[in-house]
Amino acid sequence: MGAMNAARVFLKLGGALLTEKDGREALRPALLQRLADEIAAWPGARRGQLVLGHGSGSFAHVAVAETGFLDRPGQALSLARVAAAAARLDRFVVAALLDRDLPALPVPGSLLAVCAAGQVERVRDDLVAELLGSGLLPVIYGDAAPDRLRGGAIASTEPLLAGLANALAPDRIVLATDVDGVYDRDPHAGGARRLPRIRPSDRGALSEALSGARAGATDVTGGMASKVAWMLDLVEARPGLEVRILSGLRPGAVAAALAGAPEAGGTLITAD
């Protein structure tokens, strides 16, 4: 267990996990408290070995829809309103971690990302490396960010973590969401089969599995399809990296994944 605890881990708590995505700024407070307990139980969270990211769920996603930010990305007021909504959720996450004596420090996506043409072009990985070197727990979140070509863009959590992975070389990435991995069809439709392991060579066969979307939810970042695409690219570029997508609704799953335990379940993504 000591060797596993020495690993560097990126953990993302999805917006669909932390909030009711078909509501408006609808936090799941009891779930957040339990997840904070599981994170606090991993010693690496206090030793500069964890980068925590989270989505924005019914906070920023709803703000994007209400402000029309995607249609008018150059409007500064819309960008600021979306960023303020994302920050409101982040305050809840950071407060839960601080309550457990974890040295959590918020890192807005707007500060971390350099965007162009609606995409995250690069990330300021030196900032996060410095925080980790100081024993801090960086809490990165998806955000509205300045864009040098179109005024503003959505800096989603997955490309932020992917950009950081190139410089900070995590041993594993854990994506905790509201479904227990990747399924062969929409997991909310019934009769779906979970895929225990996927590889870059499975891309072609995954199109049907990733085409479903949860009815009634507002998501401006592409949902599961974009998560899997980012992670397949990442494991292909970094052989040896393991990515696990699992349900944070299942008690103990996040704790097991942080410790590198196979009983974490979900879907494992590897290069081979």
Image: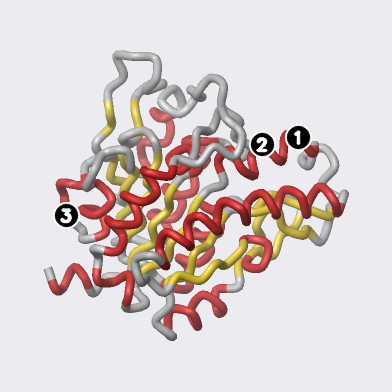
State how the image is colored.
secondary structure
Image quarter of residue 189: top left
Would you name the residue on which mark 3 appears?
A: 261
**Percent x, y for residue 148?**
81, 61
Amino acid at pointer 3: Ala
**Amino acid type of disc 2?**
Val
Q: Earlier along the polypeptide chain: callout 3 or callout 2?
A: 2
**Residue linked to disc 1:** 66
Q: Is mark 2 on a helix, strand or loop?
A: helix
Mark sitting on residue 268: none
Q: Distance between the residues labelled 3 and 1?
A: 41 Å
Residue 136 locus on image (x, y percent): 43, 77
Q: Nearer the viewer, residue 2 or 21?
A: 21
| Mark nearer the viewer, 3 or 2 | 2
Amino acid type of the residue that numbered disc 1 sits on in the rendered structure: Glu
At which x and y percent is residue 48?
37, 77
The spot of residue 206 in percent (x, y) is 41, 30
- Give the camera-side residue of 10 and 121: 10
Q: Residue visible at 29% across and 40% down?
A: 267
Q: Residues within 10 Å of mark 1 (few under 14, many from 20)?
A: few
Q: In which quarter of the image is the N terminus?
A: bottom left
Contact? badges 2 and 1 (CB < 8 Å): yes
Residue drawn at x 44%, y 40% is 28
The residue that mark 2 highlights is 62
Q: Who's the residue at 31% across and 48% down the image?
A: 244
Mark whose residue sits in front, 3 or 1: 1
